[in-house]
Amino acid sequence: MNNQIFDDVIKVANRRHYMKNIVVDEAHLVVDWGASFRVDYQCLEAWRKKLLLTNPTIRTILLSATFENECVDVLKKLFSDGEHWIEVRCDALRHEPRYILLKEKSYKDKDKKTIEIVRKLPHPMLIYVARPDDAERIKGLLAENGINNVYTYTGLTNSDQREQLLKDWKANRFEIMVATSAFGVGVDKTDVRTVLHLYIPQNPNAYYQELGRGGRDQLPCLSVMCIYPDDLQIAFQRISKRVMTTDKIAGRWDSMHNNKSSIRDGAIIHINTAIKPNYHTKDEWDDTPVSDADMNWNIYVLLLFRRYGLINIVDITNDKGIYTFSIEINSELLLNRNDNQMKLLDQIRTDEWNYYNDAYLAMKHAVQRSKNDCWSEMFFDTYDKVYEFCAGCNAH
């Protein structure tokens, strides 16, 4: 989206029919991250459709080690015409992680345990936290206790810093990385021995992808989660932020649809996503610069509408970081704000909320039942094609 030279090369190759396949690795992230802070991932749909207009023989291959059914449904909507779709499923749970859940009584006890874990458990170690502020705090906590040469990697880390951090990480120039979920994709360091979670991820799938950074050399590794009682409520508050209220969805759509900068071209509307909403409440992502928040939430609404078939996305352009979506409206209820529109938006908002809430409840249940139920049970429930496997947890 941001590399014009690459985009031009692809267009030329496609016109000359050199393009045979579009292969999307880690395709689950199109769904998991594409709806929020990595919007380019769901922009792949419109980009691919433009290529197909010139070269309809291109095949699209979507790869991942683990797919949720919900994820497969969304990918099918984005990348299939409904008829041409083949699934080859070889999902399997990884055998390397040994799971440990540590429940501390207080925030202070959790900090003490964190220091003990970092000192005693094997390195290289990857520490996952929820927000960039948390990453800096943990780095400072470790430094206060004589643990230095620790680096952070979050959504606020710029591209040059990221590239250097990954080089140094792979070259073993430091042993401890403190990161948010922004870290992981494309990182091929094989010998991470401990993955420590100091927060509760929003769903088992996100958690499994993060702990999967450990033991990629196929040798045993530790997956440790260290929490205190408030962490469950904090996790719930985080998923509450992920799904907008119906009023805000309607407000953002109305702001975009009826803005003077939204240009009509027959049935197509070109929407500038940098438009501020008609309401003034501040909406923020956990791991995104505040300056990008309005645009990200606007894109969230458009992608939400696309996933539920209310609009088609014809094209997406990016001019100096500002995204313009060219869309066609499929539902007449989007044309005017009235009771029927609100009922429609309330239904898709409810469906979206149920998805996030059900996934959160799976994490909550695993935490609460960790002494009695196998920790990997939540992964077996999440990925319905896998066989059960646990190399060790609190219950085993």
Image: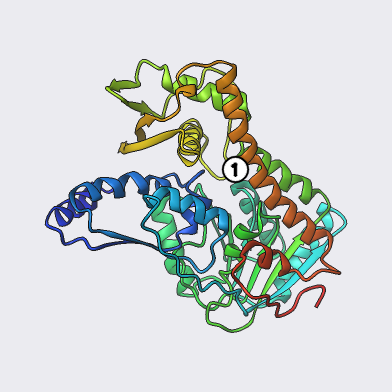
In this image, 20 relative to 359: left or right?
left
The residue shown at (61%, 77%) is 193
The residue shown at (66%, 54%) is 201
The residue shown at (40%, 59%) is 85
Circle 1 SS class: loop
In this image, 132 relative to 29: left or right?
right
Instruction: Using a 10 Å C-alpha cutoff, classify the residue at mark 1 as few (fewer than 14 neighbours), some (14 to 19) or many (20 or more).
Output: some
In this image, 52 relative to 209: left or right?
left
The residue shown at (56%, 18%) is 279
Asked where in the image residue 243 lies, by quadrant, the reply is top right
Asked where in the image residue 317 lies, by quadrant, the reply is top left
- Relative height, residue 5 to residue 265 (above, below): below
* Closer-to-camera residue (334/391): 334
* Closer-to-camera residue (299/362): 362
Three-letter code, disc 1:
Asp
Check the image and name the residue furthest to the left.
16
Check the image and name the residue furthest to the front.
83
Q: Which residue is mark 1?
A: 286
Residue 244 image point, x, y percent = 61, 33
Q: Quadrant of the C terminus?
A: bottom right
* Closer-to-camera residue (335/155): 335
Residue 297 image point, x, y percent = 51, 34
Residue 303 image point, x, y percent = 46, 39
In this image, 77 relative to 52: left or right?
right
Coloration of the structure image: rainbow
